[in-house]
Amino acid sequence: MSILRHTLLWTAALLAGAAGGAADIKIGLAEALTGGAAQYGVPIRNGFQLAADEINAKGGIQGSKILLVIEDEQGKKEEVINVFKKLIFQDKVLMIFGPTLSNSMFAAGPVANAAKVVAFGTSNTANGITDIGPYIFRNSVMESDVLPVTVATAVKHYKIKKVAVIYGNDDAFTKSGYDVFKKVLADQKIPVTATETYVKGDVDFKAQLTKIKATDPDAIVCSALAEEAANIMLQARSLGIKAPFIGGNGFNSPKLFEISKQAGDGTFVGSPWSNTNPDPANVHFVGAYKQKFGSEPNQFAAQAYDALHIAAAALKSIKLTGRLEADRQALRDALPKVSINGATGPFKFRPAAPKDGKPGGYDADQKPFIYILQQGKFNLYTGK
Amino acid sequence: MFTQQLLNALTLGSVYALFALGFTLVFGVLAVINLSHGAVFMVGSYAALTLVTRLHLPLGIALPAAMALSGCLGMAIDVLILKPLRARNAPHLIPMIATIGVAIMLSSAAQGIFGAEILRFPEGTIPAGEFTLGEVHVRALELSIVGISFGLMAVLFLAIRRTQLGRALRAIAESPRSASLLGINVEGLFHATSFVAAALGGVAGVLIGLNFNAITPLMGQPILHKGIAVIILGGMGDIRGALLAGLFLGFAEVMSKAYLSSQMGDAVAFGLLFLILLVRPSGLFGRVLERKA
Amino acid sequence: MEWLANFWATYSTLVYSVGVFALMALSIWLTLACGLLSLANAAFMCIGAYVSALLSLHAGWPFGATLAAAGAAPALVALVIGMPTLRLSGVYLAMATLAFGEVVRIVVLNLEVTGGPEGLNGIPQSTTGWHILAILAVVVYGLLRLQRSRVGRAFEAIREDEVAASLMGINVARHKLFAFVLGAVIAGLAGGLNAHYTFFISPREYGFENAVDILTMVVLGGIGGLAGPMLGAAIITLLPELLRSLHEFRGIVNGLILVLVVLFLPKGIWDPRRLRALFGLGPGRDPGC
């Protein structure tokens, strides 16, 4: 009995040694893999897995393999704090990617910041995320960097005089997009004929669109996720609305025209990523993703993929000592200097402005591309 | 614009009514608030989708098949879970909690099998016709949803009013014990009711999945909340009430979005429910229930 | 010792959550003890959380004062809506309180001061384990005393038979309102505590699912005594964490456990009579009810 137990223990120890040797670089990944936010969390995890496999296949980082410790945070506040603590104190990861939702980062970010561990969001676009503290990073581009360019381009192209607005008002992502749109429209002095809202899970937008139609806008500004946006477009067309759409970050998914077909033609979208961007880094990413997962990547997957390459670049620039606290700090200090050319194009960080005298984290410093939807495809807008 | 909003309200209202139909039937006969009804609705949608995409069946076959499948699921829930609870005369909250467990299981299973992404029917599944009448745009699909909803409700209503089976059901709704003393096979009718209710839920799932082009593991949740509001307004267990209340809620929601503020659409719906309950404690169209819940 | 420190660093939030949800479960248990099925407690928790967070963030109140406000604000609301609603019975009361909960959630979602769907962030982390433990102890002690007092016996009489209770001279409406308001105070305190250890609150934490979750805790644990709801709260809070290694299957197992408990443990997990029977300490059979 006791011999058997010993053998088992030894085998277990050996297996553990083989699977997660001391030389591995442990990186935590906290994403919503079940529940309502899983539709973003799952592609994000895929993007990370693809990048990790590629980096490890090329020999890892200075001979060490990247080991992703993946945890499901379900998009729930308490869960995400528990997961962050588990990754930081139990799994002793070097840094954490995630969580999926901006709201979750507001809950879990302070935990990582207090423990002096980098929390790196790839899908958090809300304002104020990086105000949490100097250990908070993100490569997701804020709407306030993208939308002014999108609106100005569309206004010039269509000679827009007045617009109507529709947005999801119970979702932090679409609501913060709307807040930016509102400010941009006021700054650019474009009158709004009607402001309509819907809530998550709504699939019928006709009441709002009928109202919008009556105000006869030149364009419809829409802060919505791709699926909702596509249904809004389809229902708008079936109500006989001809005005083009101007979309936020949520539009940037192949889902948009998979569903809306040609209903979205003429839509203007600004985004750091598009699957048709001909840059070799992006072409490689899109091909590899399709091969590995059998589906089209989206923006969330692309930003996740780039994020791991950003971390890898930082890791290559430092020497890991094996002392956890020192290594975590070294990684934190190396990250802001990274600049890469990834699936989302050239990328570097920009320090967030200090708030109330406290130092902030780092936001993405990327130029958005402006796309126009034509025949159910995103085409880079070149200005006639 | 008003005529268009009327049509919008009619579509939304019949969707609510169709969903609430099975929901209210189970409550009327089994006296259980079946919170797995939303999950059954979701299963119906996925079943039809799988039949269309994997077996390449036309919708005309996939729809009844999905209806039968969700019916069987409903009956299985009744036989495996609700029946033992009835047998030991559990207080009315207990079966409700059990159905919450079922709903969690079903939606997790759906996510495990189909993933969390939004799925949709392939192009060409849906009859694509649409036409314009003056100011009003109408899609053939919407008309068929209104038609199917009203058709099913009429059939159910007549079945319960006019047939022997319906009389037995009404006897059970009054008192299961006296019904069984009268020689009615109460357990058998409970199973049958669960089958019919779940089948109706499944159809609603397919139709709504088609109309709004989005099938997700959690699609049953928002409509479940509306369904609860509808059966309360309609008077619990009252089929005609569910129809009226479904339409009423659809109108209240669309009109408050159209003429008040779209932000408050849901608040208006639930605020109205709250107020109506204060004025009429058994719902807008409900009789006063003497039997203690 | 280092192991313990590490364990606490990892799981302290989880332990806090168990305490807070034990309070929530007790708040619903209290209304159930008086025969009221109310689903408004998630909304009272929401009001408590927002009031205390706003006072901490904008008015700079000390933590103790914000907690007092977290208990008082929902109590006021409960007093106002309780008077007309509590005459509804059974399922209708449940639905009216559910509708009230939805209205609260939607209003919070659309107000400027509550931050809308983005919620409130940067709430100071003032709650410690001691706060939760102390409040839980006071609530448990108070409820135990209440159970054995005249009021507690009146609750029981109302739960068993409302008409008979009123014939015996018990003021049914007033007792119901008392249970409802006291439940709101406990839920509001739980909300205030919760807001001050999670940094962040948003309307989606206080919806229908959460109301049902809390009710589930009570039914699962057993409504026979105070231990049941607290045990139920601990199980529902810990279960997803314990099942973490199951990944995608954890929802299925979670749901299955719920169904099995309901099927095979009729009075909830904490059933003193069954436990006594199990250890051979007394009559195991339920005497004729």
Image (cartoon, coloured by chain):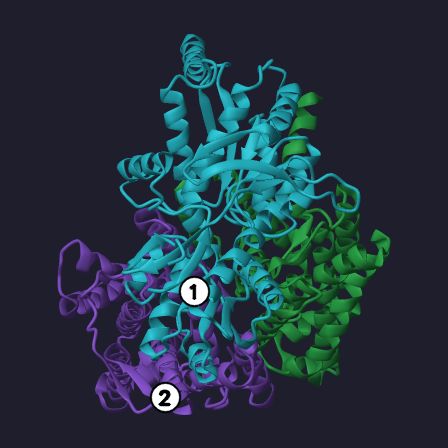
Q: Could you say which is closer to the camera, residue A295 or residue C97?
A: A295
Classed neighbour count for the residue bearing mark 2: other residues with Cα under 10 Å, few (<14), some (14–19), many (≥20): some
> Is B224 placed left or right of A124 in the picture?
left
In the picture, one chain is cyan; tell me its letter: A
Q: Colour of chain B?
A: purple
Tell which subunit mark 1 falls on.
A
Q: Position of residue B115 (x, y in %)?
A: 34, 49
Residue A43 percent location from the top left of the image: 40, 44
Mark 1 surroundings within 10 Å by alpha-carbon count, few (fewer than 14), some (14 through 19), many (20 or more): few
Q: Secondary structure at mark 1?
A: helix
B32 vs C253: above or below: below
The amino acid sitting under disc 2 is Arg
Give whichever of A315, C233 is nearer the camera: A315
Percent position (x, y) of residue B89?
Answer: 44, 67
Q: Is residue A144 visible?
A: yes
**What chain is tagged by disc 2?**
B
Above or below residue C17? Residue B119 is below
Residue B88 seen: no
Q: Residue at x 55, y 29 (%)?
A: A338
Question: Which residue is located at x 63 percent, y 16 percent?
Answer: A323
Q: Which mark is residue B84?
A: none
Q: Nearer the viewer, residue A3 or A66?
A: A66
Query: Is the residue at mark 1 from the same chain as the one at mark 2?
Result: no
Using residue C113 as the reference point, say whether residue A377 is left or right of it. Answer: left
Residue in the image at 58% along x and 54% along y: A144
The reply to whether the C-beta atoms of the residues labelled 1 and 2 are less than 8 Å apart is no
Q: Give the CA separation, mark 1 to mark 2.
A: 54 Å
As drawn, the chain in green is: C
Residue linked to disc 2: B240
Q: Is residue C4 above or below residue A3?
A: below
The residue at 41%/41% (across/down) is: A302
Q: Which residue is mark 1?
A: A157
